[in-house]
Image (cartoon, rainbow, N blue to C red):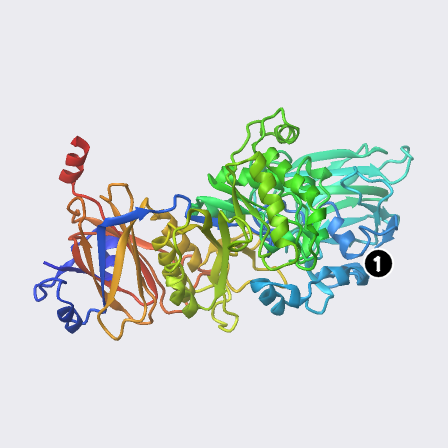
């Protein structure tokens, strides 16, 4: 007898905790295709459990890039923006100038975003013709295309009549060359920091403050005190404060724990003095739950929790275009990103137009892997930026940097770079299996020869390291695995579910689909992603799961976006947040469902169309154990109408229990999405149902993914355990 499951019944079951699927006695089965077509069924899905192959164990993961304030103002929990004033110094063309002091006039703080000084504009913005793929699209849709405005918000402002002066005369250390001098000669004054579009504080919560202070002159006779205050955006209400005295003529670090007396997402941090002059540097404020410098987890807890909810198997980091840079000077380099925080110089994120403190350095990225339990995939700069290519004859220093980075990650505490890692707080080495050599660089001058230089140097010292090329190198160079990126419209994404079917399973040419997403600026209804795009991606993912002998790793991109970011904001992102709230978009829940139901083996899944109305069915079935006694059946309906499909499971090693589980993700219409006001509008609904069997009918709601989970009966489990 054939049973049927509908979406609405499933939701009803979810509320009641279980129900019985309806029987259809007028239908004798699903063997006869013509009878099924006459009955109004749209497709037949046949699963043969005797024909399986292994699913790549690390198939579904995540890709982190410092884009759209993913780290600075996002995952990295620092609440003070530009804590060492280097970002401000860069935008004013002071950081690398020969000048020793720069008095900041009011123009430096006008508007909501900083403007690049003329001397910086020529190197700060890329030439569109030199960009690739989505990077080019992003620049065509941003708001700083005139070469003036950046994505760096103005976070520092003078308080009162205080004169602010950037100075190099008294550097904190060799890595931190810029300090801010405050002169308050006409009464009380100081400087304020507004964080990342406001500092969010909660009543009763504690915050760890640290900053460096020193007198601006050699006189130690006059009384000088500095008050640091958490306060409302206009300074009318104080939430917490501390006063520091005994300010020395040498740099000294001052710390305090501040407990907020109110909740405010638009607070600011003020450094105040009554009179006199003081030098300030490295002003930092962390939620106490994250600790301060040397903390085990410097990550914002709500965003970290969302990342854990994706159940990722790997983490690709620290980015794509971010690694390259617009020019070589503003790419990401790991050595300046490790060691004490106050000695990290930071760098201009030239691709995405804001300052990176490098608080998220190689050490912190490895801590993040530890937190998530993921396999690290470390992407290195191979001497190519968007506008420049380093000749292979000059690449040896960068090759050595790559080898040193592996030693930092995997070397014991007696090695040079392993010792630094141990000194930073992690004596035990981490494991590292994958390294990506560059990002989207195929076709650029020197890529092939540079790639070969890195490939053979790494293989000679670390023969088991799996190296990832930017394309299939063919006869030009050995390819163990290669990067595959795709951003497209919803229909193309759905139709792309057969992309990998024609690729042969070749051990030395596996695919890493490290960036894919529905991107469509032409559809104004998906500024943050909607259910239509998410379901198109789900269909595409069934194709990667089917071809997981070829596609070994896959990650959606971009991962994170602060909605306040100005400029190149992608139309879809997995996790959206501001300074106090965060949620996952519909694509987030698709990714989480596939990761949860990845399984160990893929069971052959065939789809036969039974009706002209079938224009959007995709499916993938995986075994949750090697014996294939438990199945996860993913059914995708990329159509704007409900479809009923027939599902037949053949050659199951054990009879299927009549009690199963169902999870459905859908929306009211194709535009359905999530928001800060309704973060769970599109969210998986789960429940149990009865009368699950090898032959059932399933009603699929418009633009939906339905996951059916089966299990063997109790007697079958007992027989298996006694076998």
Residue found 47% across the figure and 47% down from its top:
307
With respect to residue 149, does 303 lie above or below? Answer: above
Q: Is residue 153 left or right of residue 648?
A: right
In terms of secondary structure, where does tag 1 sit? loop
| Front residue (pair 329, 274) | 329
- In the orientation shown, which residue stands out farthest toward the bottom? 612
| Front residue (pair 672, 86) | 86
| Front residue (pair 547, 177) | 547
| Front residue (pair 248, 2) | 2
Numbered disc total: 1
- In the orientation shown, which residue stands out farthest toward the top? 414
Q: Quadrant of residue 701?
A: bottom left
| Residue 360 placement (x, y as % from top left) | 62, 43
Q: Is residue 204 left or right of residue 186?
A: left
* Mark 1 lies on residue: 105
| Residue 297 placement (x, y as % from top left) | 55, 37
For mark 1, does the 10 Å Cα neighbourhood hold few (<14), some (14 to 19), or many (20 or more) residues? Answer: few
Residue found 71% across the figure and 64% down from its top:
149
Residue 23 visible in the current orientation: yes
């Amino acid at each position: 007898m054939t049973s049927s499951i509908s979406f609405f019944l499933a939701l009803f079951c979810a509320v009641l905790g279980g129900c019985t699927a309806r029987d259809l006695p007028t239908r004798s089965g699903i063997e006869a295709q013509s009878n099924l077509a006459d009955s109004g069924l749209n497709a037949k899905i046949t699963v043969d459990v005797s024909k399986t192959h292994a699913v790549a164990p690390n198939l579904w993961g995540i890709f982190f890039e410092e884009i759209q304030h993913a780290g600075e103002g996002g995952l990295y929990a620092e609440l003070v923006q530009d804590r060492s004033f280097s970002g401000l110094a860069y935008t004013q063309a002071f950081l690398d100038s020969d000048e020793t002091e720069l008095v900041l006039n009011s123009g430096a703080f006008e508007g909501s975003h900083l403007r690049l000084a003329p001397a910086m504009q020529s190197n700060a913005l890329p030439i569109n013709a030199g960009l690739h793929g989505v990077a080019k699209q992003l620049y065509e849709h941003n708001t700083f295309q005139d070469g003036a405005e950046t994505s760096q918000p103005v976070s520092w402002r003078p308080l009162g009549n205080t004169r602010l002066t950037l100075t190099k005369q008294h550097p904190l250390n060799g890595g931190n060359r810029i300090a801010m001098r405050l002169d308050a000669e006409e009464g009380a004054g100081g400087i304020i920091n507004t964080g990342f579009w406001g500092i969010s504080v909660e009543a009763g919560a504690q915050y760890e403050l640290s900053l460096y202070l020193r007198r601006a002159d050699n006189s130690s006779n006059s009384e000088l005190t500095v008050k640091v205050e958490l306060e409302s955006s206009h300074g009318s209400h104080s939430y917490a404060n501390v006063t520091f005295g005994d300010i020395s003529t040498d740099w000294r670090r001052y710390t305090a724990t501040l407990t907020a007396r109110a909740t405010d997402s638009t607070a600011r941090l003020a450094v105040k003095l009554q009179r006199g002059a003081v030098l300030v540097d490295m002003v930092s404020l962390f939620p106490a739950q994250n600790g301060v410098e040397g903390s085990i987890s410097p990550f914002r807890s709500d965003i970290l929790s969302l990342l854990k909810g994706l159940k990722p198997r790997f983490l690709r980091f620290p980015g794509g275009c971010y690694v390259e840079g617009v020019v070589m000077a503003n790419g990401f380099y790991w050595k300046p990103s490790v060691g004490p925080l106050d000695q990290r110089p930071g760098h201009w994120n030239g691709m995405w137009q804001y300052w990176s403190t490098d608080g998220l350095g190689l050490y912190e990225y490895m801590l993040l892997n530890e937190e998530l339990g993921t396999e690290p995939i470390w992407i290195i700069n191979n001497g190519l930026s968007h506008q420049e290519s380093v000749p292979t004859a000059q690449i040896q220093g960068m090759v050595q940097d790559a080898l040193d980075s592996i030693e930092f990650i995997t070397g014991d505490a007696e090695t040079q770079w392993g010792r630094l890692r141990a000194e930073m707080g992690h004596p035990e080495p981490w494991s590292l299996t994958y390294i990506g050599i560059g990002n989207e660089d195929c076709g650029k001058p020197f890529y092939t020869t540079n790639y070969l230089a890195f490939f053979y140097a790494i293989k000679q010292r670390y023969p088991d390291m799996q190296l990832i090329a930017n394309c299939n190198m063919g006869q030009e160079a050995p390819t163990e695995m290669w990067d595959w990126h795709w951003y497209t419209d919803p229909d193309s994404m759905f139709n792309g579910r057969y992309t990998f079917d024609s690729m042969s399973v070749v051990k030395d040419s596996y695919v890493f689909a490290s960036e894919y997403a529905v991107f469509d600026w032409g559809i104004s209804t998906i500024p943050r992603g909607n259910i239509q795009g998410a379901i198109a991606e789900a269909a595409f993912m069934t194709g990667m799961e089917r071809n997981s002998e070829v596609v070994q790793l896959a990650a959606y991109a971009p991962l994170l976006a602060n909605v306040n970011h100005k400029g190149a904001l992608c139309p879809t992102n997995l996790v959206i947040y501001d300074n106090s709230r965060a949620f996952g978009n519909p694509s987030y829940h698709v990714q989480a469902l596939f990761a949860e139901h990845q399984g160990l083996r893929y069971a052959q899944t065939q789809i036969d169309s039974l009706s002209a109305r079938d224009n959007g069915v995709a499916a993938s079935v995986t075994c949750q154990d090697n014996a294939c006694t438990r199945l996860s059946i993913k059914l995708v309906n990329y159509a704007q109408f409900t479809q009923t499909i027939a599902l037949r499971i053949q050659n199951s090693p054990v009879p299927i229990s009549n009690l199963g589980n169902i999870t459905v993700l859908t929306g009211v219409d194709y535009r359905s999405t999530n928001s800060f006001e309704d973060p769970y509008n599109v969210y998986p609904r789960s429940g149990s149902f009865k009368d699950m069997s090898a032959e059932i009918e399933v009603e699929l709601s418009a633009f939906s993914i339905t996951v059916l989970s089966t299990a063997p009966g109790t007697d079958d489990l007992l027989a298996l355990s006694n076998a």
